[in-house]
Image (tube, helix red, strand yellow):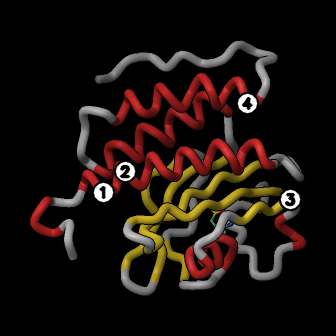
Amino acid sequence: MAEALEIAPKGASKKERYEMLLPQLKYLVEDEDDLIANCANIMAALKEAFGFFWVGVYFVKAEELVLGPFQGPLACTRIGYGKGVCGLAWKEARVILVPDVDQFPGHIACSSLSKSEIVLPILYKDRVVMILDVDSDQLNDFDEVDAQYLQSLASLMSEIFAKSIPVEKSNL
Ligand code: SME
């Protein structure tokens, strides 16, 4: 499928925006098994619906996170285990909300314009396999509403990851 996204009207709340977007994301990835293709469209949809400064995924590959599909300015391609917000979210397998990146020890500034961010781990069989990172050029731009809805998106992305694995490898 490749249809236009239905975006909430100007003035809609963040909650309304997520509620309108999430079902469309499910539909968007329904008939496609390819992980990169699905992640790429989801990042494009998030950018279009929210105008996020930067939104993208990192894949866990051996000892590092490696940049995947994203929308926004150029980003760091590799992040070490436990490093920065993304590496810590990976290590501790938890959502990290950063209201002010300058106050976060070890924050990795891919862009000096980024001011706040939210990072979520995406799990498969209890292991972090991807990281979802959303950045804003405004301070304190993310809250519990983002955490709640992006958590649902992280679950969808976990399903996307699972269905991208060839059956013969899915028990590894
Ligand atoms: N700020 C992140 C690095 C990734 S970029 O923001 C795209 C971090 O500290 O892990």
Tell me if 17 is positioned left or right of 139 in this view: left
Q: Residues within 10 Å of mark 2 (few under 14, many from 20)?
A: some
Q: Is mark 3 within 8 Å of ligand 1?
A: no
Residue 146 in the image, given as x and y percentages of width and height: 72, 45
Instruction: State the residue at coordinates (46%, 39%).
Output: 42
Q: Are marks 3 and 4 in contact (CB under 8 Å)?
A: no
* Residue labelled with disc 2: 159
Residue 168 in the image, given as x and y percentages of width and height: 10, 66
* Residue labelled with disc 1: 162
Instruction: State the residue at coordinates (34%, 36%).
Output: 29
What label sits on residue 99 in the rendered view?
3
In the image, which is nearer the foreground, mark 1 or mark 3? 1
Q: In the image shown, does 85 or 161 lie closer to the viewer?
A: 161
Which mark is first along the chain, 4 or 2?
Answer: 4
Question: Relative to residue 15, is residue 159 depicted above or below?
Answer: below
Quadrant of the picture in which ligand 1 is shown = bottom right
State which quadrant residue 129 falls in: bottom left
State which quadrant residue 19 falls in: top right
